[in-house]
Amino acid sequence: MDDRAMFAIALEEAKKGFAVGGLPIGACLVSQDGEILGRGHNKRVQEGSVIKHAEMSALESTIQDPAHPPPASVYRGATMFTTLVPCVMCTGACLLYGIGRVVYGTGADQSVAIDTLKLLEDHGVETVGLGVQECEEMMGRWIEENPARYRAEPWCTEA
Amino acid sequence: MDDRAMFAIALEEAKKGFAVGGLPIGACLVSQDGEILGRGHNKRVQEGSVIKHAEMSALESTIQDPAHPPPASVYRGATMFTTLVPCVMCTGACLLYGIGRVVYGTGADQSVAIDTLKLLEDHGVETVGLGVQECEEMMGRWIEENPARYRAEPWCTEA
Protein backbone atom coordinates (compact mmCIF):
# COMPACT_ATOMS: atom_id res chain seq x y z
CA MET A 1 0.00 0.00 0.00
CA ASP A 2 1.28 3.46 -0.90
CA ASP A 3 0.98 5.18 2.48
CA ARG A 4 1.76 8.63 1.10
CA ALA A 5 -0.91 8.43 -1.60
CA MET A 6 -3.57 7.24 0.83
CA PHE A 7 -2.50 9.80 3.42
CA ALA A 8 -2.96 12.52 0.79
CA ILE A 9 -6.70 11.70 0.79
CA ALA A 10 -6.87 12.19 4.56
CA LEU A 11 -5.03 15.51 4.18
CA GLU A 12 -7.43 16.57 1.43
CA GLU A 13 -10.31 15.85 3.81
CA ALA A 14 -8.66 17.94 6.55
CA LYS A 15 -8.38 20.85 4.12
CA LYS A 16 -12.03 20.47 3.09
CA GLY A 17 -13.04 20.89 6.72
CA PHE A 18 -10.66 23.79 7.29
CA ALA A 19 -11.97 25.59 4.20
CA VAL A 20 -15.39 25.90 5.83
CA GLY A 21 -14.13 26.80 9.29
CA GLY A 22 -14.17 23.28 10.66
CA LEU A 23 -11.53 21.47 12.65
CA PRO A 24 -8.81 20.59 10.12
CA ILE A 25 -8.62 16.86 10.71
CA GLY A 26 -9.19 14.28 7.98
CA ALA A 27 -9.13 10.52 7.69
CA CYS A 28 -9.24 7.77 5.10
CA LEU A 29 -9.89 4.09 5.76
CA VAL A 30 -8.25 1.54 3.44
CA SER A 31 -8.87 -2.21 3.49
CA GLN A 32 -6.14 -4.81 3.73
CA ASP A 33 -6.51 -5.25 -0.06
CA GLY A 34 -5.88 -1.56 -0.69
CA GLU A 35 -9.51 -0.63 -1.33
CA ILE A 36 -10.67 2.77 -0.06
CA LEU A 37 -13.53 1.93 2.30
CA GLY A 38 -14.33 5.42 3.53
CA ARG A 39 -13.10 8.96 4.03
CA GLY A 40 -14.23 11.97 6.03
CA HIS A 41 -13.37 14.90 8.21
CA ASN A 42 -14.23 16.28 11.62
CA LYS A 43 -17.79 17.70 11.81
CA ARG A 44 -17.62 19.30 15.25
CA VAL A 45 -18.14 22.83 13.95
CA GLN A 46 -20.26 22.03 10.92
CA GLU A 47 -22.81 19.82 12.72
CA GLY A 48 -22.06 20.54 16.37
CA SER A 49 -21.38 16.82 16.60
CA VAL A 50 -19.74 15.40 19.70
CA ILE A 51 -18.79 12.11 18.03
CA LYS A 52 -18.03 12.87 14.38
CA HIS A 53 -14.28 13.13 14.57
CA ALA A 54 -12.44 12.51 11.30
CA GLU A 55 -11.91 8.81 11.92
CA MET A 56 -15.53 8.33 12.96
CA SER A 57 -16.75 10.15 9.83
CA ALA A 58 -14.52 7.89 7.72
CA LEU A 59 -15.96 4.81 9.42
CA GLU A 60 -19.53 6.07 9.01
CA SER A 61 -18.93 6.86 5.32
CA THR A 62 -18.32 3.14 4.68
CA ILE A 63 -22.09 2.65 4.84
CA GLN A 64 -23.48 2.68 1.32
CA ASP A 65 -26.80 1.03 1.99
CA PRO A 66 -28.13 1.38 5.55
CA ALA A 67 -30.21 -1.78 5.10
CA HIS A 68 -27.07 -3.77 4.30
CA PRO A 69 -24.14 -2.36 6.26
CA PRO A 70 -20.81 -4.06 5.60
CA PRO A 71 -20.01 -6.91 7.97
CA ALA A 72 -17.32 -6.18 10.55
CA SER A 73 -14.90 -8.44 8.67
CA VAL A 74 -14.52 -5.71 6.02
CA TYR A 75 -12.68 -3.51 8.51
CA ARG A 76 -10.40 -6.17 9.98
CA GLY A 77 -6.75 -5.43 9.30
CA ALA A 78 -7.59 -2.17 7.51
CA THR A 79 -5.41 0.94 7.77
CA MET A 80 -6.77 4.17 9.24
CA PHE A 81 -4.99 7.18 7.78
CA THR A 82 -5.52 10.28 9.87
CA THR A 83 -3.89 13.69 9.86
CA LEU A 84 -3.42 13.81 13.66
CA VAL A 85 -2.85 11.15 16.32
CA PRO A 86 -6.31 9.73 17.12
CA CYS A 87 -8.05 10.69 20.36
CA VAL A 88 -9.10 7.96 22.76
CA MET A 89 -12.65 7.68 21.31
CA CYS A 90 -11.32 7.11 17.78
CA THR A 91 -8.67 4.78 19.19
CA GLY A 92 -11.47 2.76 20.76
CA ALA A 93 -13.33 2.68 17.43
CA CYS A 94 -10.19 1.39 15.69
CA LEU A 95 -9.83 -1.34 18.33
CA LEU A 96 -13.53 -2.28 18.07
CA TYR A 97 -13.32 -2.78 14.31
CA GLY A 98 -9.99 -4.59 14.35
CA ILE A 99 -8.09 -1.92 12.41
CA GLY A 100 -4.57 -3.26 11.85
CA ARG A 101 -2.60 -0.06 11.26
CA VAL A 102 -2.95 3.61 12.10
CA VAL A 103 -0.92 5.99 9.94
CA TYR A 104 -0.93 9.58 11.19
CA GLY A 105 0.46 12.91 10.02
CA THR A 106 1.72 14.41 13.24
CA GLY A 107 1.29 13.93 16.95
CA ALA A 108 -0.53 16.98 18.27
CA ASP A 109 -1.80 16.19 21.75
CA GLN A 110 -5.51 15.47 21.66
CA SER A 111 -5.35 12.55 23.97
CA VAL A 112 -6.62 13.95 27.29
CA ALA A 113 -3.58 12.51 29.08
CA ILE A 114 -4.05 9.06 27.57
CA ASP A 115 -1.26 7.75 25.37
CA THR A 116 -3.39 6.49 22.51
CA LEU A 117 -0.48 5.30 20.39
CA LYS A 118 0.58 3.06 23.28
CA LEU A 119 -3.00 1.85 23.73
CA LEU A 120 -3.14 0.90 20.04
CA GLU A 121 0.24 -0.81 20.10
CA ASP A 122 -0.58 -2.68 23.32
CA HIS A 123 -3.47 -4.24 21.40
CA GLY A 124 -1.47 -5.21 18.36
CA VAL A 125 -2.18 -2.21 16.11
CA GLU A 126 0.84 -0.94 14.19
CA THR A 127 1.28 2.85 14.34
CA VAL A 128 3.24 4.89 11.81
CA GLY A 129 3.96 8.61 12.03
CA LEU A 130 4.67 10.37 8.75
CA GLY A 131 5.92 13.63 10.26
CA VAL A 132 3.71 15.87 8.11
CA GLN A 133 4.09 19.20 9.94
CA GLU A 134 1.36 20.81 7.84
CA CYS A 135 -1.22 18.87 9.88
CA GLU A 136 -0.16 20.40 13.16
CA GLU A 137 0.28 23.83 11.60
CA MET A 138 -3.30 23.84 10.28
CA MET A 139 -4.55 22.87 13.71
CA GLY A 140 -2.47 25.67 15.25
CA ARG A 141 -4.08 28.14 12.88
CA TRP A 142 -7.58 26.85 13.69
CA ILE A 143 -6.91 27.22 17.41
CA GLU A 144 -5.66 30.78 16.88
CA GLU A 145 -8.73 31.67 14.84
CA ASN A 146 -11.23 29.92 17.15
CA PRO A 147 -10.10 30.47 20.75
CA ALA A 148 -13.58 30.11 22.27
CA ARG A 149 -14.38 26.92 20.37
CA TYR A 150 -10.99 25.56 21.27
CA ARG A 151 -11.57 26.12 24.98
CA ALA A 152 -14.83 24.15 24.71
CA GLU A 153 -13.02 21.04 23.42
CA PRO A 154 -12.20 18.15 25.75
CA TRP A 155 -8.62 18.07 24.42
CA CYS A 156 -7.98 21.78 25.13
CA THR A 157 -4.72 22.00 27.06
CA GLU A 158 -5.25 25.54 28.37
CA ALA A 159 -5.81 25.95 32.10
CA MET B 1 -28.36 10.55 42.30
CA ASP B 2 -30.95 7.78 42.14
CA ASP B 3 -29.11 5.23 40.02
CA ARG B 4 -32.15 2.97 39.57
CA ALA B 5 -34.38 5.82 38.35
CA MET B 6 -31.79 7.02 35.83
CA PHE B 7 -31.01 3.49 34.74
CA ALA B 8 -34.72 3.00 34.02
CA ILE B 9 -34.42 5.63 31.28
CA ALA B 10 -31.54 3.71 29.67
CA LEU B 11 -33.63 0.53 29.86
CA GLU B 12 -36.60 2.32 28.30
CA GLU B 13 -34.32 3.38 25.43
CA ALA B 14 -33.13 -0.22 24.96
CA LYS B 15 -36.75 -1.37 24.71
CA LYS B 16 -37.55 1.38 22.19
CA GLY B 17 -34.78 0.04 19.96
CA PHE B 18 -35.82 -3.57 20.46
CA ALA B 19 -39.44 -2.76 19.59
CA VAL B 20 -38.40 -1.80 16.05
CA GLY B 21 -35.96 -4.67 15.54
CA GLY B 22 -32.86 -2.77 16.64
CA LEU B 23 -30.12 -3.85 18.98
CA PRO B 24 -31.64 -3.60 22.48
CA ILE B 25 -29.07 -1.34 24.09
CA GLY B 26 -29.93 1.99 25.67
CA ALA B 27 -28.09 4.75 27.49
CA CYS B 28 -28.74 7.89 29.49
CA LEU B 29 -26.17 10.56 30.37
CA VAL B 30 -26.63 12.48 33.62
CA SER B 31 -24.54 15.44 34.76
CA GLN B 32 -22.81 15.65 38.11
CA ASP B 33 -25.73 17.85 39.25
CA GLY B 34 -28.26 15.18 38.33
CA GLU B 35 -29.46 16.82 35.12
CA ILE B 36 -30.30 14.50 32.22
CA LEU B 37 -27.98 15.63 29.43
CA GLY B 38 -28.92 13.06 26.82
CA ARG B 39 -30.43 9.67 26.09
CA GLY B 40 -30.47 7.30 23.17
CA HIS B 41 -30.24 3.77 21.85
CA ASN B 42 -28.21 1.78 19.38
CA LYS B 43 -28.97 2.65 15.72
CA ARG B 44 -26.98 -0.09 14.02
CA VAL B 45 -30.03 -1.73 12.44
CA GLN B 46 -32.18 1.37 12.03
CA GLU B 47 -29.56 3.52 10.29
CA GLY B 48 -26.88 0.99 9.39
CA SER B 49 -24.62 3.14 11.54
CA VAL B 50 -21.19 1.85 12.51
CA ILE B 51 -20.73 4.38 15.31
CA LYS B 52 -24.16 5.05 16.82
CA HIS B 53 -24.02 2.71 19.76
CA ALA B 54 -26.33 3.58 22.65
CA GLU B 55 -23.73 5.61 24.54
CA MET B 56 -22.73 7.50 21.38
CA SER B 57 -26.38 8.27 20.61
CA ALA B 58 -26.82 9.57 24.15
CA LEU B 59 -23.75 11.79 23.77
CA GLU B 60 -24.92 13.05 20.38
CA SER B 61 -28.40 13.80 21.75
CA THR B 62 -26.87 16.37 24.13
CA ILE B 63 -26.58 18.73 21.15
CA GLN B 64 -29.59 21.03 21.15
CA ASP B 65 -28.22 23.75 18.88
CA PRO B 66 -25.49 22.64 16.44
CA ALA B 67 -24.20 26.23 16.28
CA HIS B 68 -23.66 26.26 20.04
CA PRO B 69 -22.71 22.75 21.19
CA PRO B 70 -22.18 22.41 24.94
CA PRO B 71 -18.60 22.92 26.10
CA ALA B 72 -16.77 19.79 27.14
CA SER B 73 -16.99 20.86 30.78
CA VAL B 74 -20.70 19.91 30.76
CA TYR B 75 -19.78 16.24 30.50
CA ARG B 76 -17.01 16.19 33.09
CA GLY B 77 -17.85 13.97 36.03
CA ALA B 78 -21.18 12.92 34.47
CA THR B 79 -22.59 9.42 34.82
CA MET B 80 -23.22 7.24 31.77
CA PHE B 81 -26.03 4.77 32.40
CA THR B 82 -26.02 1.95 29.88
CA THR B 83 -27.85 -1.35 29.73
CA LEU B 84 -24.75 -3.38 28.81
CA VAL B 85 -21.05 -3.00 29.58
CA PRO B 86 -19.72 -0.44 27.06
CA CYS B 87 -17.61 -1.59 24.11
CA VAL B 88 -14.14 -0.16 23.66
CA MET B 89 -15.32 2.65 21.32
CA CYS B 90 -17.90 3.88 23.83
CA THR B 91 -15.36 3.43 26.61
CA GLY B 92 -13.01 5.71 24.67
CA ALA B 93 -15.81 8.26 24.25
CA CYS B 94 -16.44 8.22 28.01
CA LEU B 95 -12.73 8.77 28.64
CA LEU B 96 -12.55 11.59 26.07
CA TYR B 97 -15.39 13.49 27.72
CA GLY B 98 -14.22 12.91 31.28
CA ILE B 99 -17.24 10.85 32.34
CA GLY B 100 -16.84 10.08 36.03
CA ARG B 101 -19.04 6.99 36.45
CA VAL B 102 -20.39 4.23 34.24
CA VAL B 103 -23.42 2.39 35.60
CA TYR B 104 -24.37 -0.69 33.58
CA GLY B 105 -27.14 -3.28 33.62
CA THR B 106 -25.23 -6.46 32.95
CA GLY B 107 -21.90 -7.53 31.57
CA ALA B 108 -22.55 -9.26 28.25
CA ASP B 109 -19.28 -9.53 26.39
CA GLN B 110 -19.10 -6.94 23.66
CA SER B 111 -15.54 -5.99 24.31
CA VAL B 112 -13.61 -7.77 21.54
CA ALA B 113 -11.22 -9.23 24.13
CA ILE B 114 -10.58 -5.87 25.77
CA ASP B 115 -11.58 -5.52 29.41
CA THR B 116 -13.33 -2.17 29.14
CA LEU B 117 -14.33 -2.00 32.81
CA LYS B 118 -10.66 -2.30 33.73
CA LEU B 119 -9.74 0.35 31.13
CA LEU B 120 -12.29 2.73 32.66
CA GLU B 121 -11.16 2.02 36.21
CA ASP B 122 -7.49 2.37 35.27
CA HIS B 123 -8.32 5.92 34.22
CA GLY B 124 -10.25 6.85 37.31
CA VAL B 125 -13.80 6.12 36.14
CA GLU B 126 -15.99 4.41 38.73
CA THR B 127 -17.96 1.43 37.37
CA VAL B 128 -21.10 0.04 38.94
CA GLY B 129 -22.96 -3.09 37.80
CA LEU B 130 -26.64 -3.25 38.71
CA GLY B 131 -27.14 -6.91 37.79
CA VAL B 132 -30.24 -6.32 35.68
CA GLN B 133 -30.55 -9.69 33.91
CA GLU B 134 -33.30 -8.38 31.61
CA CYS B 135 -30.62 -6.49 29.63
CA GLU B 136 -28.68 -9.60 28.75
CA GLU B 137 -31.87 -11.57 28.12
CA MET B 138 -33.11 -9.01 25.57
CA MET B 139 -29.75 -9.16 23.81
CA GLY B 140 -29.95 -12.97 23.79
CA ARG B 141 -33.36 -12.76 22.13
CA TRP B 142 -32.08 -10.27 19.54
CA ILE B 143 -29.16 -12.57 18.69
CA GLU B 144 -31.54 -15.54 18.34
CA GLU B 145 -33.84 -13.55 16.06
CA ASN B 146 -31.05 -11.95 13.98
CA PRO B 147 -28.32 -14.56 13.48
CA ALA B 148 -26.97 -13.05 10.24
CA ARG B 149 -26.79 -9.53 11.61
CA TYR B 150 -25.18 -10.85 14.76
CA ARG B 151 -22.43 -12.58 12.79
CA ALA B 152 -21.68 -9.26 11.03
CA GLU B 153 -20.98 -7.51 14.33
CA PRO B 154 -17.41 -6.95 15.55
CA TRP B 155 -18.34 -8.27 18.98
CA CYS B 156 -19.77 -11.57 17.65
CA THR B 157 -18.16 -14.37 19.62
CA GLU B 158 -19.07 -17.17 17.18
CA ALA B 159 -16.20 -18.79 15.29
Image: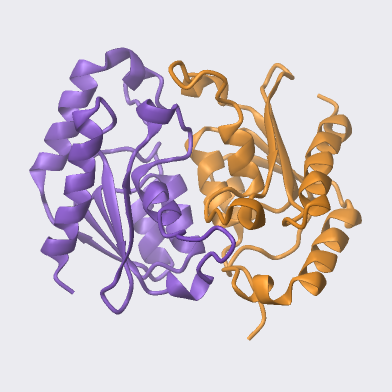
Chain colours: A orange, B purple
Residue A150 position (above or below residue B58): below
Foreground pick, A151 / A28: A151
Foreground pick, B41 / A117: B41
Residue furthest top in the image? B148
* Residue drawn at x 48%, y 39% as measured from the top left: B51
Whether residue B159 is visible to the viewer of this picture, yes or no, is no
Residue A63 position (above or below residue A90): above
Foreground pick, A128 / A81: A81
* Residue drawn at x 46%, y 46% as measured from the top left: B89
Which quarter of the picture shows residue A3? top right
Foreground pick, A117 / A133: A133
- From the top left corner, tell me how far across and down residue A64 is, in percent: 57, 20
Residue A140 position (above or below residue B153): below
The C terminus of chain B, quarter of image: top left
Is A129 positioned to the left or the right of A156 in the image? right
The N terminus of chain B, quarter of image: bottom left
Which quarter of the picture shows residue A94? top right
* Residue drawn at x 26%, y 17% as measured from the top left: B146
- From the top left corner, tell me how far across and down residue B55 is, in percent: 36, 50
- From the top left corner, tell me how far across and down residue A147 is, in percent: 73, 76
* Residue drawn at x 70%, y 16% as measured from the top left: A33
Is B1 positioned to the left or the right of A159 in the image? left
- From the top left corner, tell me how far across and down residue B103 is, in percent: 24, 60
